[in-house]
Image (cartoon, rainbow, N blue to C red):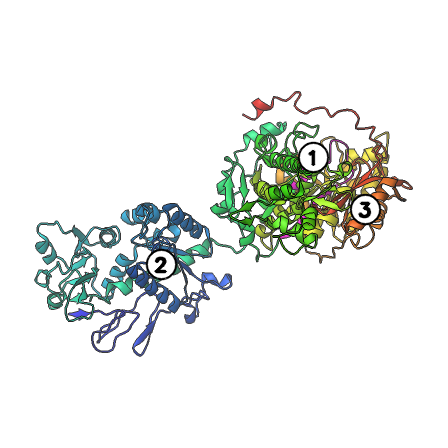
Amino acid sequence: MMEWTYFWRLAGDVCRHCLCAPARSFEIPGQPVHHGNHCIWKQDCTTGEGAAEEGGSSDEESVPRFQAWLGCAADGHLVGDRDDSNLYISMKLKAAAEIGINANHIRLPETATEDEVLRRIVAVNENPAVHGLIVQLPLDSINPINTEKVTNAVAPEKDVDGLTSINAGKLSRGDLGDCFIPCTPNGCMELISQTGVSVMGKNAVVIGRSKIVGAPMHDLLLWNHATVTTCHSKTLDLAEQVGRADILVVGAGRAEMVKGEWVKEGAVVIDCGINHIPDSSKASGKRVVGDVQYPSAIERAGYITPVPGGVGPMTVAMLMKNTVESAKRFLQTYTPGKWSIEYTKKKPQEPQPSDAEISCSCQSKPIGELAREVDLFSEEVEPYGRSRAKIRLDALKRMEKQPDGKYVVVTGITSTPLGEGKHTTALGLAQALGAHLNINTFACVQEPSPGSFFGARGIAVGGGYSQIIPLEEVSLQPLGQHELISAASRVVMDTIKAHAHYESKLSEKALFDLLVPLRKGQRSVSPAQLNRLKKLGIEKSDPLTGTEIRCFVQLDIDPDIATDSGSLENEIMAILSLSSSEEEMQQRLAKIVVATNKSGDPVTTEDLNVSGPLAMLLKDALKPVLMQTVEGTPVFLHTSPLADIAQGSPSVLADKLALKMVGSKGFVVTVSGHGADIGLEKFFNIKCRYSGLRPDVVVIVATVRTLKMHGGAPPNLKQLERGCCHLKRQVENAQAFGLPVIVAVNKFSCDTDTELELVCGQARQAGAFDAVQCTNWSEGGAGALALAEAVQRAAKLPGQFRFLYDTQIPAADKLRTVAQKMYGAKDIALSPKSIEKLVLYTKQGFENLPVCIAKTHLSLSNDPMLKGVPTNFMLPITDIKANVGAGFLCCLTESTNTEMDDPMWPCFHGNNLHSDSK
């Protein structure tokens, strides 16, 4: 008879990490190495060099700092505080530490609900840094928890305990190489193999039918070609069945139920039982025994496992082995920094269908699937139907230490009312980089504004085979952002009205009691009110003197200098777009100047004590919306600040999150409103100043049609060449910020090769890094491949980004700088009203804000009828508004808007949108 020991010593010199007898030793997988009375499992998980000491290579060598991770959970992340569960977990943690596996023990209180446990399991499932997850049973919660449901919630590829129904099913049908085998049965098989006894053809008896030991043990023996009989406590001829067993595995959970005399002479006996029986000789009054009567069985068995110290430690060893195997499988398909995403390359049809028909013909993947493909966790995604989801800001916090990708901003020349196709080009570029060049790529665009859906530019965001789908959801079914902003504006306006009313009707003490009510003898002072008191130089909140109360409650608003709801909504939208976090949004909301008092001091939302409710109301609107293009490229839609009286670009949050998600080798393509003279200037001087982001490449979109317009009539090749002076000016505008500029010529079917080559040549002469033709409207990403390759080359150049002006210079000088360097103006002409406003804002401390000039987007000048490159004109500044919360001075110009007096003809005439989108 040969006796085993594992983490246990019977007699003589034995090894602690492999099954050894006094006279011989047996190796377990992982190449044990003996050191005196100890043995280490030779698997270096930190470097992934399993057998590298023999001179071999490993799959993990390409991944720096590979380390297997084991998420160790008891009760689904230790629900409760059972002593036995804590003991088992401590053994697993110790074993993991000894071989270099980073094991983490997540605890939940005994009050944890099933839903809480499941959410934690899902979070670990989705974490690529964790390769194994175990649920330590039993579930010790005061709330009902379905053990089967919790166990099966573990992802099969991380189920290193092998207990999910999927792994059990694969084992049952013999797919041993495609599943994780439960650790105890797997350890039993390893013990049997170390005896040298062949399983093939032997009579094997398994006593017990549990899902953890008995049932999988039966399957393992069967698929290793033994003749297997499964018995249990109700088997009538149990002794007879045991007597025929060459291999006996017992896991019934009944103390010493198998008698020694039942055991066949020379049989291999594996005892999986752990039971406690009374023993007065022990300090605890009990001792641990197995399911086999060890003293008598040891006399007949050829090999037998002791209890304790036999199967248990081997079970832990198999858990470690499974974890390492899981990590290796993960690395076989894992490429650091690369998404596992499937794109859909749409074959264009001729003649080209409408945007609605194209959208209808494209089956968008479920938004949850897209979110997983771009490495978002399910707890970070809030689905809004099948094709859209809001992304929680927790995702950005999780990724804050990850490097940013390359940042590309798409702008245009001064366009016709029909536009240049900036969004179409941006989406085509993103599709080319993603679906065709296999680079992690995100597009970021503005959410469509209400009222713009049926304009002359069409209903789609983008167009043709470079649009966001489904069309009807992105354009016609908004997510409520504008409604929230309107509600926030009404709250502020109503608060102003109410405060003014009660300020005139009530005594100062009565108004103070309304503003700061007594609750249980204490004044309920909000953080906003504390800030107002500090601003007034009052360092206490209660009790206040009569003078202090008067200063606190009397806003004394000048009704002639109060804001209106439209201006307020525009500023709130700009705040959403420029905020990088909920905290920053609340700080910005608190700074909104809603009026001026009769002493000339600003009155803010914080003074009204309404900034907190505004932040709560707008919290949901701060989440970017995830959608996809025709080819499956991910897109963020978020915020829609106007490009004339605000910065006119997607939100800072959308860009920041996308840059983290694509990784250091990926690209984010974002869009600035209108032309380079307006939208790009504000993108850099306002958005980039506050976000801290620095773009790598500028893409300017141009069309032959618009350049002919800038060249004047008749629209021939000569006039086109003359119109290219406008393109040259816009290239210079973009180069003023120190970045490489690429011109993308958006090709129309009526454009000739000669015209297109002329424009590209003129762009290169103007100093563009490159100029390429784009056909992504009709060909999707394939039509923007040349642009994508040019962007890749340009992004490798060292960045020399610079702002156009220093915010510390006087506001008038900032206005003059923009007007002269971007528009080509001779100078600015400040009206008496704007001069008065500048004096007021200087007094109020707002002079150092960047400037936002609101002028027509149809000309470099303030006159939309002046095309090409107007010169020697004065830019009239008629009024200035301080958007302090958004962080800029909005400067209005005098525009002779004769061209736009006629209303825009809606696009839905001649289009059966309802039928096309079915």
Helix, strand or loop at label 1? It is helix
- Which of the two discs, 2 and 3, sits closer to the camera? 3
Q: Looking at the rendered structure, which numbered label has been put on residue 565?
A: 1
Query: Which quarter of the figure has residue 6?
Result: bottom left
Q: Is residue 135 above or below residue 878?
A: below
Helix, strand or loop at label 3? It is helix
Label 2 to label 3, Cα distance in Å? 71 Å
Q: Position of residue 772 (x, y in %)?
A: 72, 43
Query: Which quarter of the figure has residue 29?
Result: bottom left
Label 3 vs 1, first from the N-terminus? 1
- In magenta stretch: residue 874: no
**Mark 2 — residue?**
322
Q: Position of residue 281 (x, y in %)?
A: 15, 71
Label 2 vs 1, first from the N-terminus? 2
Q: Looking at the rendered structure, which numbered label has been put on residue 840?
A: 3
Q: Is residue 512 above or below residue 273?
A: above
Q: Position of residue 282 (x, y in %)?
A: 18, 70
Q: Is residue 731 left or right of residue 266?
A: right
Which range of residues does the magenta coloring cover? Answer: 405-426
Q: Residues within 10 Å of mark 3 (few under 14, many from 20)?
A: some
Label 2 to label 1, Cα distance in Å? 63 Å
Query: Which quarter of the figure has residue 352?
Result: top right
Q: Amino acid at mark 3?
A: Leu
Q: Is residue 387 left or right of residue 810?
A: left
CB atoms at circles 2 and 1 under 8 Å apart? no
Q: Is residue 822 left or right of residue 325?
A: right
The quadrant the N terminus occupies is bottom left
At x 58%, y 24%, the residue is 916
Q: Amino acid at mark 1?
A: Ser
Helix, strand or loop at label 2? It is helix
Q: Looking at the rendered structure, which numbered label has been put on residue 65?
A: none
Q: Position of residue 619 (x, y in %)?
A: 57, 43
